Image (spheres, coloured by chain):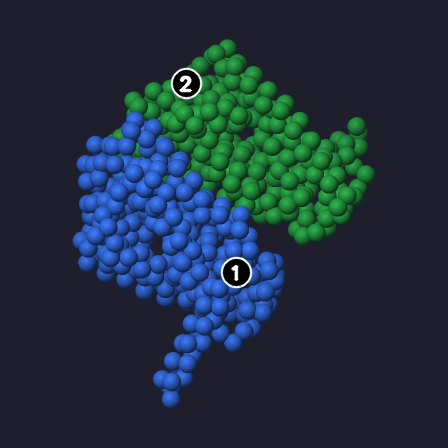
Chain colours: A blue, B green
């Protein structure tokens, strides 16, 4: 009976998550110009890094980069890093900002008194953001293929998907933490922006781990994005991996579990705090 | 005239008071534009194995790419300020419920806009000063006293042009209400088409579009003075073109604002959210 009940509960939670996902799609597709802009913006965001690389090396290839990573094409190296790093947006902006947006719409209190745990709602936003980011990713790959002739190893897709899945697992934990912080700080964009900026500095997106100072290298090794981006580039463009494949997978799982547990704990503590203090409705 | 000056002073006081209520936001804008440059520095080191590049010198005039992008980051603070601060200020008045009072008051709107622009200039100059200090002590950027005055002159001209654009944006905000997406798009286009992060000569299309952006001439002149030790006499053409763009941007900006304001007052949509 207990098992049946919990299965029923899981189904209800999944339905709630999907409802949240569908709601967000409906809102986004109502503002079509904004939707198109959202598709193009990550692409425009990458251009300065690519053009900066080309200005430095006077073309696409760098012998220094080849010595460090095994990849000589600086343009492809940079593009792949930034395209897949887009999933960080899903955590810090998509999920982290979900509750703040409900506050703007004036529906946050209604959601918080609904008979589902609040984390279900945040996971619904995670589902939406991940699907949205996935669509953007395919669009970006198509555009950079046409514009820059970026060619990827198709046979590496399966392990890449594993890396993306494990990275997303950790990022959900980060998203839960940011959601919680947004409930306290209200103007949560600063929390999102600060975390995003710091994680992008320590993650080897457009450069290998070796160029970072020793302290930043140590911090970098605690980030899921480090293993995921390096692993993805290893399978798609043959970047040398500093850490073995199974070691990378197991570290990603370990970081994921830690981040998810921390995210859930932090979210629950903040949730209780704002309800007890009655500051939930404060704007 | 006295009333206008009073209005400008009060608008500046109000905006500075609001800003001081958010100390975390002040810290953020004073520090983070410099931190956003760090990935470019690491990327450069990974590509050329140091902090100089002969290929970069052919395009930028200097082989030192770190000072190049640091100056770009510092000066682009005025871009953020004009787009988000000034452009979004009208939207904030609508959030606070004070927009109708401002537009309905018998005050001259140009004075209100000038007050907003000047308060943004003051806060941006504070952010820029902090960033320069970080760059000098953290990244070893040097700045001699003799260069400060000519740099300030160019910055002043840049601010006028950018706020001309921001006034137009404020007018558009009156009409379309939610202008955040438009602001984001303009920000990305400025990043793409002006030499903030890289020399625009890398691509002919980018180089052509950059000619109509005031930030291009300001960065060329400021880097000429700051990094390349060029005399002012060789930079007058950039300063002249910047001044010309200022006149165009301010005139067109005010005309757009005036037109939009009349339009929303006639249509009765000022109070619409």
Vertical order, A151 against B118 (above or below): below
**Quadrant in the rendering for residue B115:** top right
- Residue A26's disc number: 1
Q: Residue at x 22, y 36 (%)?
A: A72
Residue B169 x/y as whole percent = 62, 38
SS class of the residue under badge 2?
Answer: loop
> Where on the picture, by quarter, is residue B197?
top left
Give percent across and percent down for residue B40.
36, 36
Q: Which residue extends farthest top?
A: B233
Q: Residue at x 39, y 40 (%)?
A: A46
* Disc 2 to disc 1: CB gap under 8 Å: no
Question: How far apart are the alpha carbons under marks 2 and 1?
Answer: 53 Å
Q: Residue furthest bottom?
A: A1
* Callout 2 crowding tier (Cα within 10 Å): few <14, some 14–19, many ≥20: few
Query: Would residue B99 be found to the left or right of residue A279 on screen?
Result: right
Give the left or right position of residue B103, taking residue A182 as reference. Answer: right
In this rendering, the label closer to the viewer, 2 or 1 = 1
- How many marks the image carries: the answer is 2
Residue A144 visible from this viewpoint: yes
Q: Which residue position is annotated with label 2?
A: B228
Q: Quadrant for the N terminus of chain A, please.
A: bottom left
Closer-to-camera residue (B139/B29): B29
Snapshot quadrant of residue A14: bottom left
For label 1, the SS is: helix
In terms of depth relative to the viewer, which is nearer, B3 or A70? A70
x%, y% of residue B13? 69, 39
């Amino acid at each position: 009976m207990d098992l049946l009940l919990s299965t029923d509960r899981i189904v209800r939670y999944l339905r709630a998550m999907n409802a949240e996902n569908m709601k967000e799609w409906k809102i986004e597709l109502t503002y079509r110009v904004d939707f198109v802009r959202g598709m193009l913006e990550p692409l425009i965001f990458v251009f300065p890094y690519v053009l900066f690389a080309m200005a430095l090396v006077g073309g696409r290839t760098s012998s220094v980069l080849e010595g460090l990573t095994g990849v000589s094409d600086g343009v492809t190296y940079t593009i792949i890093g930034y395209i897949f790093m887009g999933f960080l947006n899903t955590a810090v902006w998509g999920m982290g900002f979900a509750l703040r947006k409900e506050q703007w719409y004036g529906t946050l209190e209604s959601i918080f008194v609904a008979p589902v745990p609040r984390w279900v709602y945040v996971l619904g936003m995670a589902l939406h953001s991940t699907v949205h980011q996935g669509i953007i990713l395919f669009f970006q790959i198509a555009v950079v293929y046409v514009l820059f002739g970026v060619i990827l190893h198709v046979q590496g897709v399966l392990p890449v998907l594993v890396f993306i899945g494990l990275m997303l697992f950790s990022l959900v934990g980060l998203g839960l933490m940011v959601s919680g912080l947004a409930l306290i700080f209200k103007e949560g964009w600063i929390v999102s922006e600060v975390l995003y900026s710091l994680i992008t500095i320590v993650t080897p997106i457009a450069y290998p781990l070796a160029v970072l100072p020793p302290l930043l290298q140590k911090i970098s090794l605690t980030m899921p994005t480090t293993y995921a981006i390096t692993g993805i580039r290893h399978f798609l463009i043959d970047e040398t991996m500093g850490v073995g494949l199974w070691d990378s997978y197991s570290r990603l799982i370990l970081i994921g579990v830690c981040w998810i547990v921390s995210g859930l704990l932090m979210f629950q503590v903040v949730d209780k705090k704002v309800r007890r203090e009655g500051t939930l409705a404060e704007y | 005239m006295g009333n206008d000056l009073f209005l400008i002073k009060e608008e500046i006081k109000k905006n500075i008071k609001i800003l001081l209520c958010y100390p975390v936001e002040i810290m953020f804008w004073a520090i983070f534009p410099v931190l956003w440059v760090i990935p470019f520095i690491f990327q450069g080191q990974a590509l050329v194995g140091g902090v100089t590049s002969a290929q970069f010198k052919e395009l930028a005039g200097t082989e030192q790419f770190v000072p190049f992008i640091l100056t770009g980051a510092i000066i682009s603070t005025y871009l953020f300020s004009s787009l988000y601060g000034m452009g979004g200020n009208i939207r904030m008045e609508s959030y606070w419920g004070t927009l109708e009072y401002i537009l309905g008051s018998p005050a001259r709107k140009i004075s209100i806009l000038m007050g907003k622009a000047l308060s943004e200039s003051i806060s941006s100059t504070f952010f820029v000063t902090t960033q320069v200090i970080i760059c000098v002590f953290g990244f070893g950027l040097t700045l001699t006293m003799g260069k400060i005055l000519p740099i300030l002159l160019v910055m002043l001209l840049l601010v006028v042009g950018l706020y001309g654009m921001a006034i137009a944006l404020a007018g558009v905000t009156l009409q379309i209400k939610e202008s955040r997406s438009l602001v984001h798009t303009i920000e990305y286009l400025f990043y793409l088409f002006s030499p903030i992060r890289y020399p625009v000569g890398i691509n002919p299309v980018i180089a052509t579009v950059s000619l109509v952006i005031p930030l291009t001439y300001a960065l060329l002149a400021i880097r000429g003075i700051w990094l390349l030790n060029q005399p002012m006499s060789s930079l007058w053409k950039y300063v002249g073109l910047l001044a010309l763009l200022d006149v165009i941007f301010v005139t067109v900006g005010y005309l757009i604002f005036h037109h939009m304001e009349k339009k929303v007052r006639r249509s009765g949509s000022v109070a619409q959210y």
